[in-house]
Amino acid sequence: MASTYAAFSALDAAIDRTKSLLWPFDLGVWLRLAVIAFFVGGTGFNVPSGPSYSVSGDEFAGIGPADIGIPGGVPGFLLLLIVVIVAVAIVFWVLGAIFQFVFVDSLRTGEVGIRRYVGPRAGKGFRLFLFEAGLALLILLFVVIPFALIFFTTGGLDVRFGALMLIPIVLLFIAAVFVLAILLGLIMLFTIDFVVPIMIRDDCGVIDGWRSAWRIIRSEWKQALVYAIVKFLLGIAVGILMIIAVVIAAIILAIPFGIVGVLIAAAGGSVPVYIVLVALFVLFLIVAALFISVPFVTFLRYYSLEVLAAIAPEYTLLPGAGPVA
């Protein structure tokens, strides 16, 4: 067992590598990293669950869209809209998985690029997407099925059973979801930070990558535990700093846009003009936020690669990285 925890010793090296890559300033490098950050940041699990209601269908028998003032074509349009939104979300999810490999390739070679890496890494990225989608579905089933059982076995929203009977069950359910969320977070942390680089080094799939990662985690469990804690705290700190920076950027951008808005008002501008102005402001703010995120996401990715190299030298992807002293 190493005498020093890699989670701490890797910090300085990650900072130095981030500075070396991003300075002196190169617009092309920053722009490509901003695009990568956009897709990498879009990979996640946001599976909303709507509220459940216990309502008898007889209460609304005979009521159709026309009876409540909804055009007949609207339900079909809404269905199409939902399908389009889901399809776009899946496309971005797949791209996000692919760009995890693009990001690592860009950092390990020192040549930040997109097109040169997307093609060769599409297969591995799609496998990563399937793994994430399967995990998301599994978690969803673990959440939905117990909730459905609780709901129906307690009579739904029937007040005859009393709210007090539900309190211990709901508290237990919330505790289980909390534990499940922690487990999911750990799985995704080590999947992105360890398994992805292992897949690149060993040219393997997600399952084989996880076998190798699990061997590392078991043999260096203290290192892995400390890393998970430090990475969580770093994520909070980085999130706070990014929010502050984005707020400052929003204030700076609001000044010229506010002046333009005043001039438009003086000229008797219409509502569509204001809508365009607000849309442009939001667009500029998104671009600014992406550029602001570049040093943070770059540092965090370098950091994870440094830690992996420190506790498992056979998976050293960065030049000069190695085992912890």
Image (cartoon, rainbow, N blue to C red):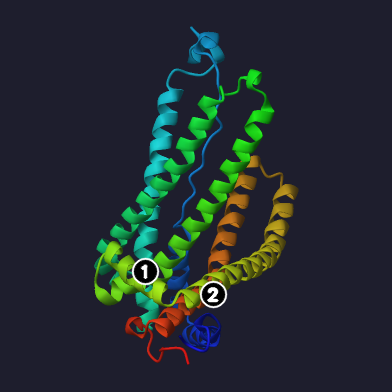
Other residues around mark 2 within 10 Å, as few (<14) / some (14–19) / many (≥20): some
Q: Residue 113: tell me if it is visible.
A: no
Residue 74 position (above or below residue 262)? above
Residue 166 position (above or below residue 19)? above
Seen as rendered, the residue at the extreme top is 62
- Callout 1: SS: helix
On the picture, is 129 further left or further right than 67? left
| Tag 2 residue | 226
Q: Which mark is residue 40?
A: none
Comparing 10 with 102, the one in front is 10
Q: Residue 230: give x, y in percent of width and height.
A: 57, 73
Could you tell me which residue is drawn at 49 percent across and 37 percent down?
Answer: 146
Quadrant for the N terminus in the image: bottom left
Dots 2, 1 in contact, CB < 8 A: no
Name which residue type carries label 2.
Answer: Val
CA–CA distance in space, label 2 to label 1: 16 Å
Name which residue type carries label 1.
Answer: Trp
| Tag 1 residue | 214
When asked about the image quadrant of residue 105, the answer is: bottom left
Comparing 160 with 111, the one in front is 160
Q: Residue 295: tell me if it is visible.
A: yes
Residue 120 position (above or below residue 271)? below
Q: Residue 55: give x, y in percent of width and height.
A: 55, 17
Other residues around mark 1 within 10 Å, as few (<14) / some (14–19) / many (≥20): some
Comparing 129 with 177, the one in front is 177
Could you tell me which residue is drawn at 61 percent across and 19 percent down?
Answer: 158
- Callout 2: SS: helix
User: Of the residues under marks 2 and 1, which one precedes in the sequence?
Assistant: 1
How many labels were placed on the picture?
Answer: 2
Q: Residue 276: give x, y in percent of width and height.
A: 59, 48
Could you tell me which residue is drawn at 49 percent across and 59 percent down?
Answer: 185
Comparing 153 with 92, the one in front is 153
